Image (spheres, rainbow, N blue to C red):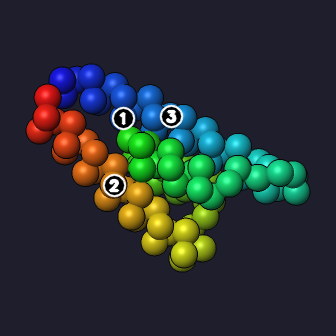
Amino acid sequence: MALLLLVIVAAMSLVTALLFGLDKVQAKRGARRVPEARLLLAAALFGAPGAWFAASLFRHKTRKRSFQLRLVVASAICAGLCYGVLEVF
């Protein structure tokens, strides 16, 4: 089960990183953005590692303290879900 969880986290991290990248591109273009709620939901649902990686890589959402705090909460939820999956299965 641990291997399956690792695959899920890797896949969701990739999806989350792509969402962050898309949001950064849209921000530069002045186009419609990816909602913050969607970014945070993706992070909470097993994509937190990708969120932190992408935020650092793209220098995106790093100055917005309120978002950073919510990303910490989403990461804690992600960690709790991972722990729960490992404990149940």
Q: Which residue is mark 1?
A: 9
| Image quarter of residue 46 | top left
Q: Amino acid at mark 3?
A: Leu
Q: CA distance from mark 1 to mark 2?
A: 13 Å
Question: Which of labels 1 and 2 is toward the front?
Answer: 2
Q: Amino acid at mark 1?
A: Val
What is the secondary structure assignment of the residue under circle 2? helix
Kindly tell me whether residue 53 is visible in this rendering: no
Q: Amino acid at mark 2?
A: Ile
Q: Which residue is mark 2?
A: 77
Q: Is residue 38 shown left or right of residue 52?
A: right
Q: Earlier in the sequence, mark 1 or mark 2?
A: 1
Outermost residue toward the bottom in this view: 65
1 and 2 marks in contact (CB < 8 Å): no
77 lies above or below 6: below
1 and 3 marks in contact (CB < 8 Å): no
Q: How many marks?
A: 3
Q: CA distance from mark 2 to mark 3?
A: 18 Å
What is the secondary structure assignment of the residue under circle 3? helix
Q: Which residue is mark 3?
A: 14
The quadrant of the image that shows the C terminus is top left
Kindly tell me whether residue 48 is visible in this rendering: yes
The quadrant of the image that shows the N terminus is top left
Name the residue at 62% across, 58% down.
Answer: 36
Question: Which of labels 2 and 3 is toward the front?
Answer: 2
Q: Earlier in the sequence, mark 1 or mark 3?
A: 1
What is the secondary structure assignment of the residue under circle 1? helix
Say which mark, if any, is on residue 80: none
Q: Position of residue 57 (x, y in %)?
A: 56, 51
Name the residue at 61% across, 64% down.
Answer: 61
Q: Position of residue 59 (x, y in %)?
A: 61, 60
